[in-house]
Amino acid sequence: MDLKYKRKNVYKEADGNELKQIYDFAEGYKKFLDTSKTERDASETAKKLAEEKGFKPFSFSEKLKAGDKRYFLNRGKNIFLISVGKEDVAKDGVRIMVAHVDSPRLDLKPNPMYEEAGLCYFKTHYYGGIKKYQWTALPLALHGVVMLRGGEKREVCVGEDENDPIFYVTDLLPHLGGEQSQKTLGKAIDGESLNAVIGGLPAVDDEEEKECVKAAVLKLLNKKYGITEIDFQCSELCFVPAGKARDVGFDGALISAYGHDDKVCAYPEMKAVFDYDSPHTVLAVFADKEEVGSDGTTGMQSKVISDVIETIAASFGANPIEVRYNSKCISADVTAGFDPAYSSVFEKRNTTFVSCGAAVSKYTGARGKSGTNDAPAEFMGYLRDIFEENGVIWQTGELGAVDAGGGGTVAKFIGNLGIDTVDVGVPVLSMHAPYELISKADVYSLYKACLAFIK
Ligand code: MN
Ligand code: MN
């Protein structure tokens, strides 16, 4: 028995067969990412895949039985995948895996459209924790929905097809950026200047029109979607980085993409539910609003998850409180992987490293662990055992050095329900940047961790 603990590198441990599995798994993940940029996109993708796997829509008034596979699409932005097992749900509880599918981005303001200096723009209000300077001068795509009068919904996705136009937030040229470059990073780009160019062609047929470009863009939008300007007030539209997930490095060991946080955890938990017929009752959740505090009907502070668990309990005449207390949860979210370029904010002995496996965080929080779900030692011990039994390579760490900053996940909201919960995710570099970086080895390790958890 090894007396000393040593972190393992997944790639080093893998034989040829497993290496192939890691790379193959990554192909499915990249495909998922490319159709799952927003919470609506991701929930819709999951719904389609679930239907292909024989999942049927869930109803709060139905009586579930062992073997049932259900999905509950909550307002199009949050999805619950339910696989009912043969184990007694009162004693065995529910195996819950939660990952969020919203990612930082630029949302449109309710009155987004204006024209200035011959260009038409959409005004934005950023969503989640972004470094604003990273969102200028890069190709952006527009995703979301617009409600027309009478309840008709128009889906918008422009900028992803290579024949589509993209959208663009300008930055200042360095020649005139002297004053700007004296400012701190956080202040160099003002939130109100994150406005995206959406047009530049004046409507030449109307001499009287003062805002010719805006009028022309509105005409185009009206023709394509039936939209008039007031409809933006009843819409959810956002700019996300345009383009697909790409391999990184000559060996393709890593993937760069928008929104690894937290689809890199959503995908493996979903795949685990699809690939393995668990004897336990399993609930995989794609959550919304994590990046802005998890509030509202589709966030994990909502009562909806309790309602789903109660419905499962009621199906078997079980006490929902007992079901909750016997449930276990993996809060699957990313953590900050060690980045040698910024080593000072990490504490090397207690941080996670890229390619070293699923990242377990016993606690998160900031300033003396404030706002954390601190997983009990007993639950950590349980996880260690099932990971070891199932050959899951995993590591543990904190999100940065003490007092360097910190962060939180949905773990505490599940913990608050009386459910043992721990954060298990994937280390990410450049988290919350338009293109983040992860290792194929780690997303695969998390998949194995999820399989072990529901075995
Ligand atoms: Mn996250
Ligand atoms: Mn995040």
Image (cartoon, rainbow, N blue to C red):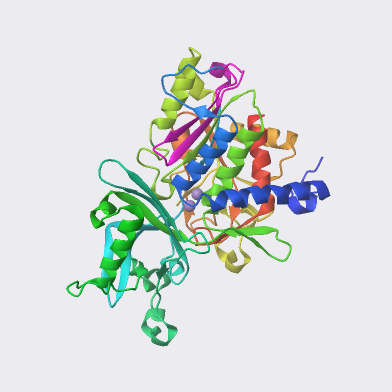
Name which quarter of the figure residue 251 lies in: bottom right
Name which quarter of the figure residue 452 lies in: top right
Examine the rendered structure and indicate whether residue 134 appears above or below residue 376. Answer: below
Residue found farthest to the front: 205
Please give the name of the residue rendered at 66% of the width and 31% of the height, measured from the top-left corner: 276
Please give the name of the residue rendered at 30% of the width and 57% of the height, measured from the top-left corner: 222
Q: Is residue 402 left or right of residue 427?
A: left
Q: Nearer the viewer, residue 339 or 270?
A: 270
- Quadrant for the N terminus, please: top right
| Residue 243 locus on image (x, y percent) | 53, 61
| Segment tinted magenta in the rendering | 66-94
Q: Is residue 196 left or right of residue 58?
A: left
| Residue 438 locus on image (x, y percent) | 62, 56
Q: Is residue 135 magenta?
A: no
Examine the rendered structure and indicate whether residue 347 appears above or below residue 282. Answer: below
Residue 163 in sight in this render: yes
Q: Is residue 231 left or right of residue 194?
A: left
Q: Is residue 87 magenta?
A: yes
Please give the name of the residue rendered at 62% of the width and 18% of the height, measured from the top-left corner: 86
Exactly how many numbered labels are in the figure? 0
| Residue 280 locus on image (x, y percent) | 61, 24
Examine the rendered structure and indicate whether residue 151 appears above or below residue 110. Answer: above
Residue found farthest to the left: 208
- Quadrant for the C terminus, please: top right
| Residue 9 locus on image (x, y percent) | 74, 52
Residue 15 in sight in this render: no
